[in-house]
Amino acid sequence: MTTTSAEPAAASAIPKPNQPDEAQKSNANDQDQNQKISQKKVHIPKPKYRLHAEDLRHPESASFSTYIPDVATTLDTALSNIVKYLYTSPETGSPVDVKSAPKCKRPHFVPFIPPTRSVTLFLRDFGGVAYTTGTELDDAHKEIHLSLPYITHCKNSAAKADPVHELAGVLTHELVHCYQHTSPPDSAKGGKDTPGPPGGLIEGIADFVRLKAGLSPPHWTRPTSSSQREKKWDAGYQHTAYFLAWIEDVWAGEGAVGMLNDRLFRVGYVGEGAEDEANGHEGGFWKSLFGAGVAELWDEYGQWLDDGEKAKGNWEEEIVNPV
């Protein structure tokens, strides 16, 4: 998905009155201001992309080129989704009907996109799926390592995965790691000891973007009852992603996960009640954002699942096929 600025409005064919009264001037000014807001464009970064194939004789090197013939466009689409779901505050996005919980304020934050300067995609022969890392000399340069044998797995009919869809999803997940926040930039300086988020939250945010982008794989299954959930909210990956999607779509409203990501950048995994957080209690961070501690939110999520399909409505369809 590529974000483009709106076309300028065409000139009106209706002649303006020669001497508009004050009310007309006020309405015109309001309309001009609203038009400027609606046309406000969210900045999409343009990092340098590099592709490094370690073994061109590996059969899946050619397969990757077949499935993802334009790597830059695939990564740009992923980056547009990252900006849309993590770095667009509701005030700068399209107006939507947000259903917020009574105890939760409408999400709002001032986005700051990490200054990632380049992303190098490595095609390598190793076990697993993929991983992301920064370079030793400059963390603003990121590396995504994709497993060539995993492409073979995707091609296997037993996997029930469309290779194009799956590879786009994996690249989206990994690119999130190149751009998401995990702690304040100066947290490692001056002897500061800023608590870091659990790994399950980091992976859950990456899969949240993948889920919202409509790139969930066939093996993901949204729980339909509290008993079908993982035991802990930070089990990670799709398990935490569905929980985060519930927070955004049901509990708090559009921009909730972006606001959470922003809070990690501003103060780290702390918040109101930071002293409790330092002792391993996560209530302060979550309560300051969403009006409830994470344990309470997890319980509310389970109760919501148990309420049945009538209460849930068309929630899953809205995530998979966003308007």
Image (cartoon, helix red, strand yellow):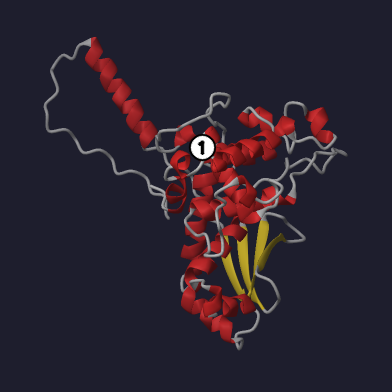
Q: Nearer the viewer, residue 210 or 292?
A: 292
Q: Which residue is mark 1?
A: 250
Q: Nearer the viewer, residue 74 or 138?
A: 74
In the image, what residue occupies the spot 48% across and 71% down? 164
Few, some or many residues within 10 Å of mark 1 (<14, 14–19, 20+): some
Task: Tell me how many marks there are.
Answer: 1
Above or below, 241 against 160 in this view is above
List the single residue furthest toward the right.
191
List the single residue furthest toward the top.
22
Q: Quadrant of the N terminus?
A: bottom left
Percent position (x, y) of residue 102? Answer: 54, 24
In the image, what residue occupies the spot 46% across and 32% down? 99
Indicate the amino acid at tag 1.
Val
Q: Nearer the viewer, residue 88 or 322?
A: 322
In the picture, measured across the screen, residue 188 lies left or right of residue 237, that is: right
Q: Quadrant of residue 263?
A: top right
List the single residue furthest toward the bottom.
57
Asked whether the viewer can see residue 178, the reply is: no
Asked whether the viewer can see residue 153, the reply is: yes
Percent position (x, y) of residue 124? Answer: 66, 77
Element carrying mark 1: helix
Above or below, 138 against 310 in this view is below
Percent position (x, y) of residue 204? Answer: 64, 51
Above or below, 285 against 168 in this view is above
Q: Nearer the viewer, residue 59 or 114?
A: 59
Above or below, 137 against 157 in this view is above
In the image, what residue occupies the spot 63% across and 79% down? 149
In the picture, measured across the screen, residue 33 lies left or right of residue 234, that is: left
Percent position (x, y) of residue 74? Answer: 48, 64
